[in-house]
Amino acid sequence: MSSTIEVDLKEILAKLDQKLDRLDQKLDTVSIQFDHKLDTVSTQLNQKIDTVSTQLNQKIDSVSAELNQKIDTVSAELNQKIDTVSAELNQKIDTVSKDVVDLKVGQARLEEKVISIEKRMDFQEFLSKGVLFTLSTAVLGILAKLFGFINNP
């Protein structure tokens, strides 16, 4: 009986060895298949990442170009408005400058007229004093003659 047990054990061990060899083969096959699928997935992911990266770069370049164009447009419009306002301000400054010159000329004319009027007033005042002096002397003389302060010859 011991010899049959040994033989049975040897057969069982041989079967187990065969099954273990098949399991090893299957594991190797699964490992190779898994590595192959992992490589395939990795390649596909890298391709998708590259595609997405390219698309993002294109979109970023597109948005950047649009923004640069808009900035250039706004800058040109702003420069044009600044030039327009500057021209208007220069025109208004020229107008104000002409008005100031006209006012200075008018002021000079008024000063001449005031000086002329002052001279006339001085002359009128001198005449008025002379006439007043003459009239008061004449009135005093008439009064003196009427009241007899001056003798009649």
Image (cartoon, rainbow, N blue to C red):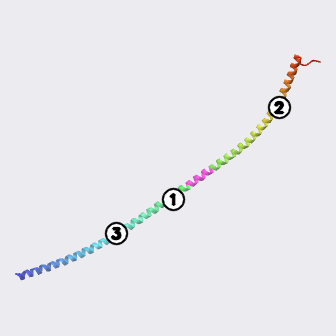
Q: Is residue 87 left or right of residue 108?
A: left
Q: Does the magenta portion include 84?
A: yes
Q: Where residue 6 sits: x, y (%)? A: 9, 81
Q: Does the magenta portion include 60?
A: no
Q: Which residues are magenta?
A: 77-87
User: How far is the residue under mark 2 from the one under mark 1?
Assistant: 84 Å
Q: Looking at the image, which is closer to me, 116 or 62? A: 116
Task: Tell me the residue that label 2 is attached to.
Answer: 126
User: How far is the residue under mark 3 from the one under mark 2?
Assistant: 120 Å
Q: Secondary structure at mark 3?
A: helix
**Majority SS type along the magenta span:** helix
Q: Residue furthest bottom?
A: 3
Quarter that holds the N terminus? bottom left
Q: Residue furthest front?
A: 149
Which residue is rendered at x = 84% and y = 29% of the image?
130
Task: Tell me the residue that label 1 is attached to.
Answer: 69
Of the residues shown, which amino acid type is indicated by label 1?
Gln
Q: Where residue 16 sits: x, y (%)? A: 15, 77
Q: Looking at the image, which is closer to me, 9 or 81? A: 9
User: Badges 3 and 2: C-beta atoms under 8 Å apart?
Assistant: no
Q: Where residue 72 sits: x, y (%)? A: 53, 58
Task: Tell me the residue that label 3 is attached to.
Answer: 44
Of the residues shown, which amino acid type is indicated by label 2?
Phe
